Image (spheres, rainbow, N blue to C red):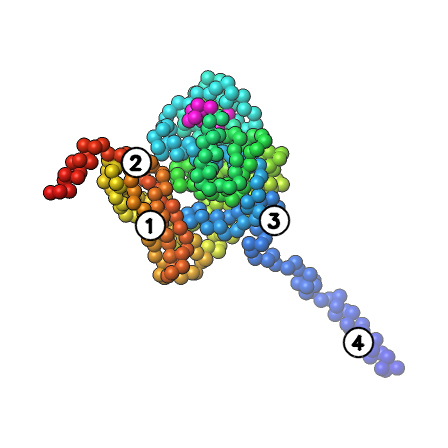
Amino acid sequence: MKSIRQRLFIALSAVMLLTMMPAAVFAEEQAPAKPEAVTQASLAPSSRSAILMDADSGTIIFEKNSHDRLPPASITKVMTMLLIMEALDEGVIKLTDKVPTSEYAASMGGSQIFLEPGEEMSVDEMLKGIALASGNDASVAMAEKLAGTEAEFVNMMNKRAEELGLKNTHFANCNGLPVANHYTSAHDIAVMSRELLKHPEITKYTGLYQDHLRKDSEKPFWLVNTNKLVRFYNGADGLKTGFTTEAKFCLTATARRDGLRVVAVVMGEPNTKTRNAEVSQMLDYSFAQYMNHSIFKKGDVMGTVKVEKGDLPELKLTAKHNYSVLLKKGSSVKDIRYELQMPKLKAPIKINEPIGKLIVYQGDQVLTEFDVDAPATIERAGWWKLFKRACGSLF
């Protein structure tokens, strides 16, 4: 009898102990697992195609179906803006030049700044309209300003794509409105974006969150950047959004922190919230994992090279943009060196024309190679100048 009472007492005590046990004990057992660290494999899961690239060296950090040919929607305007910036650099146009609006440019649908036929805006204002509001009408007006017709400007776009080595790109218009035979890839968009960023002035436009056009007129137009990351992501200052029913939600984004600038491209995202979240995660990953080691900063003198029969006998090579190599954080920078490889140059030489290579090594291993472009145009010298130069070398 006593044994039965002892067993009942022990069982009852156990039940009471369990009912009195703090809820925290059970909560601890049922707590959700901590989220796993972000890895390359977990980046951009909802995208149709994606790529993450170091803007300075072009090193690819992550890619997913990056060479698939897809409709780019308004990301097309990256190439449009690139040709505008190159025309500004070459002195073909100035920011203050007036750009007229044709009937055709004014007829563009989709996103626009509502240009009216005959209305004029400066190149500066048109760039704002393209970069912030994704103006299809402004894109066509600038195309006509630079090439006479949009069709001829599209030829320029495709020629530039070929020069950049873009294998999966073909443009049929300058603004990305749906049309047959108009496609590109995430990889090619990243290369275009990297080339555009060699013109640092562009981020004065793409990095703006809001501005005005026709501010002092009867019809002021408020511009709000379609790329919300420039407001909400630390270091973001571009570049271009895109959306059509066919392309879904696309974005080429760039951000800079601690001297490292990266480009993140996604295509075919289901909505803007997912698109922005996945691009932000891609940017976070790059800044957490990588650093760059500077070789030359913009404006640094890289060397000089002789130019045969040029109106100037030699060309001073000045870094037009930053040159750096991408390294994992904590990597050794010991034994990193570079060499300039320049073939014999002969005039004429056009500004921005590739004229040689900058090769960066660590020990005997090649880390990366850069094209070196001519920082200025050198015309062929006249016979009299060449004669005087030859005579001068005799004495």
Q: Amino acid at mark 2?
A: Pro
Q: Where's residue 164, x and y in %?
A: 44, 40
Q: Nearer the viewer, residue 368 or 327?
A: 368
| Mark 2 in CB contact with mark 4 (< 8 angstroms) | no
Say whether residue 115 is magenta: no
Q: Which residue is mark 3?
A: 45
Instruction: Tell me if mark 3 has few (under 14), some (14-19) or many (20+) residues whose alpha carbon lies within 10 angstroms of its own.
Output: few
Q: Which residue is mark 2?
A: 348
Tell me which numbered mark, 3 or 4, is placed earlier along the sequence. Answer: 4
| Mark 3 in CB contact with mark 4 (< 8 angstroms) | no
Q: Is 348 left, or right, of 175 in this rendering?
A: left
| Mark 3 in CB contact with mark 2 (< 8 angstroms) | no
Tag 1 secondary structure: strand
Q: Amino acid at mark 1?
A: Gln
Tell me which numbered mark, 1 or 2, is placed earlier along the sequence. Answer: 1
- Above-or-below relation of 339 to 202: below
Q: Majority secondary structure of the magenta segment?
A: helix
Measuring 80% from the left and 72% from the top, which residue is drawn there? 12
- Give the magenta part as a residue range: 137-149
Nearer the viewer's eye, disc 3 or disc 4? 3
From this viewpoint, which residue is outermost toward the bottom?
2
Q: Nearer the viewer, residue 309 or 352?
A: 309
Tell me which numbered mark, 2 or 4, is placed earlier along the sequence. Answer: 4
Q: Where's residue 237, x and y in %?
A: 46, 41
Q: Where's residue 78, x and y in %?
A: 48, 36
Q: Nearer the viewer, residue 81 or 375?
A: 375
Measuring 81% from the left and 76% from the top, which residue is drawn there? 9
Q: Is 67 left, or right, of 354 in this rendering?
A: right
Q: Mark number for residue 341?
A: 1
Q: Is 183 left, or right, of 198 in this rendering?
A: right
